[in-house]
Image: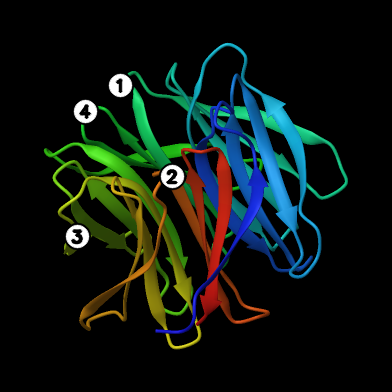
Amino acid sequence: MASVSQDVLVQFGRDSGLTGTAGYYATTEGTQHVIVGLAPAALTEVYWKSGQGVHQDTLTTFPTSRIVDIGAYFDPDDGTQHAIVATRDGALTEVYWKSGQGVHQDVLTTFSAGIVTIASYYVTGEQTQHVIVGTSDGMLHEVFWKSGQDVHQDVLTTFSQGLTDVGAYFNSDEGTQHVIVGTSDGTLHEVFWKSGQGVHQDILASFSNTIVGVAGYYVPIGGTQHAIVGTVDGVLHEVFWKSGQGVHQDVLTTFPAGIIDVGGYFNPDEGSQHAIASIHDGSLVEVFWRA
């Protein structure tokens, strides 16, 4: 495995209420972004360029209902950044902006069963935006739309074990969409499909400790798929594979204070992979290595 480095991006503090962590790379700007929730209601953006200072802004607040989880992605076709926010009242909200411009938000839909976890991604060839939603009844939903058009949703599958966290991404080389699912029994599942075709699923790995955070991304260099998994013992794992081949895993690092949630993304300009971990001591940590 390549040498792994890590940096503390921000120290929010133990009482910051840090929750929900998602990361992405903005290709047209060369910037890295992490979206997190902070108590009591702030949706916060942390962003930087490699080797430069780290900045942060409050994007918006959700004062009437607590943030449960966050998804985020960059749309390279129109240069917009998107944060998807799930709140305890079952609402799924899209927050979106262009760098240096105003922040907008819309409620996409509301779920009667409580939202446990979400992830999101953009499909370049179709210009569609996607949110994966796991609800308290074990159902895995896909919410999808094109900018300015109606929002649609489907049920992908149901997990009887109960959901702990999900990650999701688009494989641009194969035209497939992928959801990485952690369930309460420590199993890591992959759910995958092509638009308009059937949904398939596999078991990727099993962990002896409870899964608390999952993120996923695709690396076109070498055609590998990656899941970042945080377990309750503070260990940050990488699970990786090529379609139709064996699944491998490594331990990236360990956080004795414990992991709240994780994000992950690939930086194509530098050929680097990035895992973002939010830690129970209030720190936001970047773990990174070359593909």
Answer left or right for 59 relative to 152. Answer: right
Residue 132 visible, this angle? yes
Gap in Å between the C-alphas at discs 2 and 1?
22 Å
- Residue 274, given in percent of the width and then of the height, sits at 54, 66
Label 3 crowding class (10 Å Cα cut-off): few <14, some 14-19, many 20+? Answer: some
Label at residue 261: 2
**Closer to the N terminus: mark 3 or mark 1?**
1
Q: Amino acid at mark 4?
A: Asp
Instruction: Report which residue position mark 3 lands on.
Output: 201
Q: Secondary structure at mark 3?
A: strand
Q: Amino acid at mark 1?
A: Ala
Q: Residue furthest right?
A: 100
Using the image, determine if residue 133 lies above or below residue 291. above
Nearer to me, 28 or 7: 7
Label 1 crowding class (10 Å Cα cut-off): few <14, some 14-19, many 20+? Answer: some
Using the image, determine if residue 22 lies above or below residue 192. above
Answer left or right for 277 relative to 59. Answer: left
**Closer to the N terminus: mark 4 or mark 2?**
4
Instruction: Report which residue position mark 4 lands on.
Output: 137
Label at residue 113: 1
Answer left or right for 237 relative to 285. Answer: left
**Closer to the N terminus: mark 4 or mark 1?**
1
Q: How is the image coloured?
A: rainbow
Q: Quadrant of residue 35?
A: top right
